[in-house]
Amino acid sequence: MFCPPLRQFTPLLHSRRLRLSRSLPYSSNSRASLISEQVTVDCRSNGSITLDVCRATDRADPSRIVLFLPTGPVVDHYASINDDNVIRDLSRASQATVVRVNYRLAHGYFYPTPIHDVLAGYDWVLENLAPTAEANRRTGYRPRIARLGVCGQLVGGSLATMLALTECRMGGDRIAAAALHSPIVDWLFPDPSTLNGNGATGFNALPASLLIRARQTFFRNPANWFDPLASAILFFRTPGSSILSGASDHHIPSTANANFVEDFPLDYSDASAFVPIAEAEPSTSTPSQHVVPRRRAHRVFPPQGSALRLPFTRISTSSDSILYDQSAELTKLMQRSLVRTSLKAAGMLHPDALEERDRAIAEMEAEKNAEKRVSFLVGQGKGAGLWGVPGTEWEEEVEQTGLWFKEALD
């Protein structure tokens, strides 16, 4: 049975330096200023990262914490995307402390460094900010388990998905809510000519060439694309392709005509976890190709006996985004997992458990609950619809996300 490495790296936190600073308010509006403490966290022998502990209002609930993972150096003119504005609006709407984890990527840093950095930041928050059971025991209060949120878009959305799926163990401190905006959850996309997109240009567009260039920059080895901690959608299904030795990101053949299983049947009684790639249909690719198409098959996630439970998840994207298909598929697979878990817990997966009509009703109810737990929101704006882009309308969506966090973490 597939059992992914949930924690490949446990950072050791050493001395920390705290610096209190107060940023300037917006120059053109009346939004509250961003109160921030900057913390340095050592990551064993792999250098250090900084965390920005942000509170947009003095009324923030100290027990409500959201980790924010920056957008990442994917889009052109990235410096013009103001994550500070996003954090400010998110903190104000959620009345939460927002902790930005400044993970390292590009400029000499490659995967899995950002994964390690995010885990280090998460552990620091649990140890120093979250109302954990141990801290409450020391103060004499009733023990309380920390329930945190995580938020991000693009690469930040990819890392947020990874953290949400691996740190959601029931009975302990965990990620209880995740807001993912246009996350990159599958680095195994084909060449630019086969990616969907509306051909939009301008700053708010996200052309396929940028994703290809980002993949070339972020990964030393194409084999790392297959790691579920990088391509989080692979927790739920097989890759749909395999890569041969000597592969180069400069020559990725089109898989548009590959014999993939694009629409999985909702067979909740299937307990085989997944069909291994070795047992999939033979490839029709030639030896000169580096990427070999394979049939996609489901994986059972969370693994049985792991005590993981998928958090409340809000997945959003633009209808014109080139990442729309990834977001829609992730939503579908997470909902499917919740349905199967619900039916299994109720003892309804056995063929003789219920009459056919009663079973259908039970499945419909489970699907309805799954849609509430994992929601999919599609904006109608042109281009990628990224948060924090000057001159675009994103503030209302971030405010709604903050209000969602406030409800989900209470």
Image (spheres, rainbow, N blue to C red):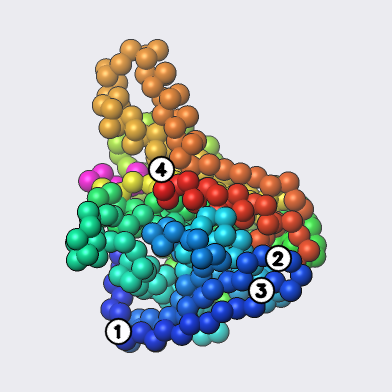
Counting residues from the N terminus, which is met first, the one under dot 2 or under dot 4?
2
Q: Residue 193: horizontal and vertical position, in percent? A: 70, 58
CA–CA distance between discs 4 and 1? 41 Å
Q: Amino acid at mark 1?
A: His
Residue drawn at x 26%, y 26% as measured from the top left: 347
Q: Relative to residue 391, is residue 290 drawn left or right?
A: left
Q: Can you identify the residue that label 2 sits on?
A: 30
Q: Position of residue 12 (x, y in %)?
A: 28, 78
Was residue 154 drawn as part of the magenta stretch in this picture? no
Q: Earlier in the sequence, mark 3 or mark 1?
A: 1
Q: Which residue is mark 3?
A: 25
Query: Considering depth in this image, is 264 or 310 the residue closer to the camera?
Result: 310
Residue bearing mark 4: 298
**Residue at the spot x=49%, y=36% of the render?**
372
Question: Is 136 drawn above or below residue 19 in the view shown?
Answer: above
Question: Which amino acid does the dot numbered 2 rest on?
Answer: Ser
Kind of element beneath mark 4: loop
Q: Is the residue under label 3 in contact with that under label 4 (CB below 8 Å)?
A: no
Q: Earlier in the sequence, mark 3 or mark 2?
A: 3
Q: Nearer the viewer, residue 143 or 395?
A: 143
Q: Which residues are magenta?
A: 298-306
Nearer-N-terminus badge (2/1): 1
Residue type indicated by callout 3: Pro
Contact between marks 2 and 4 (CB within 8 A): the answer is no
